[in-house]
Image: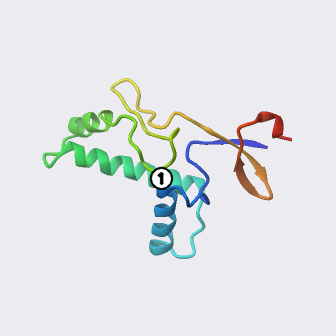
């Protein structure tokens, strides 16, 4: 089975943000299992915090939108292909996907489709 992800696997702790996510999860939710969905939420929160910082002290809806739209290729510590990029026309953020195959109950990234069986 092939599954696509928009964040790297939650067990790749050599990536700065994955390690930070795992540390925060263990501290604030001991016993909770790491996963793709909560890692994606963690990354979304990082983008929101950056947007709030850029929006400044006089926060408005429009100012927050402009601030997030000003984020271009921000290095979140997820690897070179996963840098959020926003604009007035594109609010997707992360556009690359990571194909994974389920092996031994774990999502394992791959690059060569010929290896998927």
Q: Position of residue 65 (x, y in %)?
A: 28, 36
Question: In this rendering, would 102 be left or right of 51?
Answer: right
Measuring from the top left, give residue 35's x and y in whole percent: 60, 58
The residue at the far left in this view is: 58
- What residue would you read off at disc 1? 41
Question: Which quarter of the image is occupied by the N terminus?
Answer: top right
Q: In this image, 72 relative to 80: left or right?
A: left
The residue shown at (52%, 46%) is 79
Q: For numbered disc 1, what is the local secondary structure? A: helix
Q: Is residue 23 left or right of residue 105?
A: left
Between 4 and 62, the one lying in front of the other is: 4
**Residue 13 on image: x %, y %:** 56, 61
| Relative to 90, residue 2 above or below | below
Write down the quadrant of residue 93 in the picture: top left
Identify the residue at the far right of this view: 117
| Residue name at image x 21 percent, y 43 percent | 55
Residue 96 position in % (x across, y down) = 55, 35
Q: Residue at x 26, y 33 (%)?
A: 66
Identity of the residue furthest to the top in this view: 89
Colour setting:
rainbow
Q: Quadrant of the C terminus?
A: top right
């Amino acid at each position: 089975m092939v599954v696509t992800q928009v964040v790297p696997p939650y067990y790749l702790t050599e990536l700065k943000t994955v390690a930070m996510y795992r540390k925060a999860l263990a501290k604030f939710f001991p016993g909770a299992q790491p996963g793709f969905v909560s890692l994606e939420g963690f990354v979304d929160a990082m983008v929101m915090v950056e947007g709030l910082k850029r929006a400044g002290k006089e926060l408005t809806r429009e100012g927050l939108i402009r601030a997030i739209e000003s984020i271009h290729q921000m290095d979140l510590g997820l690897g070179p292909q996963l840098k959020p990029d926003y604009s007035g026309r594109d609010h997707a953020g992360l556009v690359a996907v990571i194909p994974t195959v389920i092996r031994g109950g774990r999502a394992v990234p791959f690059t060569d489709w010929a290896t998927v069986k």
